[in-house]
Amino acid sequence: MDEREKLIVEIQEALEHVARRSFPEGAEVKVEFNPNDFQVNVFQVRTVVKTEKAPIIEIDLEEAHVYDVDAKLGDKIKIKADVPDFFSRAAAQTAKTVIRVRLKD
């Protein structure tokens, strides 16, 4: 992995760290960062189940079909979140600090 790829991974991980704070504890969060256009997409990842018992990590099959018509039991569904909610000035500062610390290591 070259230095540019390493930096991109560090940025993505820092953004995930910041975004995770906006979700309930235990939620699986995924951030996709495009270094070419600086586009950031934040997703909550939930597992498709027959009957939802833990809404933070599960989604019932019927609701999953709203996001992915091909969803099957056991699949992981990415539900896109509204990005502006995650990246306030304080969140940006946190991400910057996380990136600096990781790059020093």
Image (tube, rainbow, N blue to C red):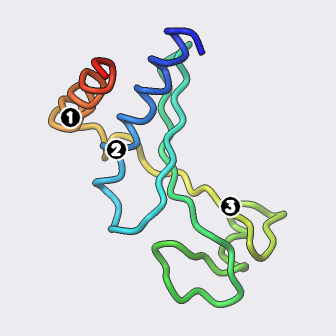
Quadrant in the picture for residue 94: top left
Q: Which three-letter amino acid code belongs to the residue tagged 1?
A: Thr
Instruction: Report the side of 23 relative to 45 (left or right).
Output: left
Instruction: Report the side of 14 relative to 40 (left or right).
Output: left
Pointer 2 with pointer 1, Cβ within 8 A: yes
Report which residue position mark 2 lands on.
Answer: 17
Instruction: Report the side of 80 relative to 93 (left or right).
Output: right
Q: Residue 79 appears at what percent x and percent y?
A: 57, 57
Q: Residue 62 appears at what percent x and percent y?
A: 72, 79
Report which residue position mark 1 lands on.
Answer: 94
| Element type where label 1 sits in the image | helix
Q: Nearer the viewer, mark 2 or mark 3?
A: 2
Name the disc covering residue 61, or none: none
| Element type where label 3 sits in the image | helix
Q: Residue 102 appears at what percent x and percent y?
A: 32, 26
Q: Which three-letter amino acid code belongs to the residue tagged 2?
A: His
Report which residue position mark 3 lands on.
Answer: 67
Please name whichever residue, 102 or 70, is drawn nearer the observer in this view of the structure.
102
Gap in angstroms between the C-alphas marked 3 and 1:
31 Å
Sequence-wise, the earlier of marks 3 and 1 is 3
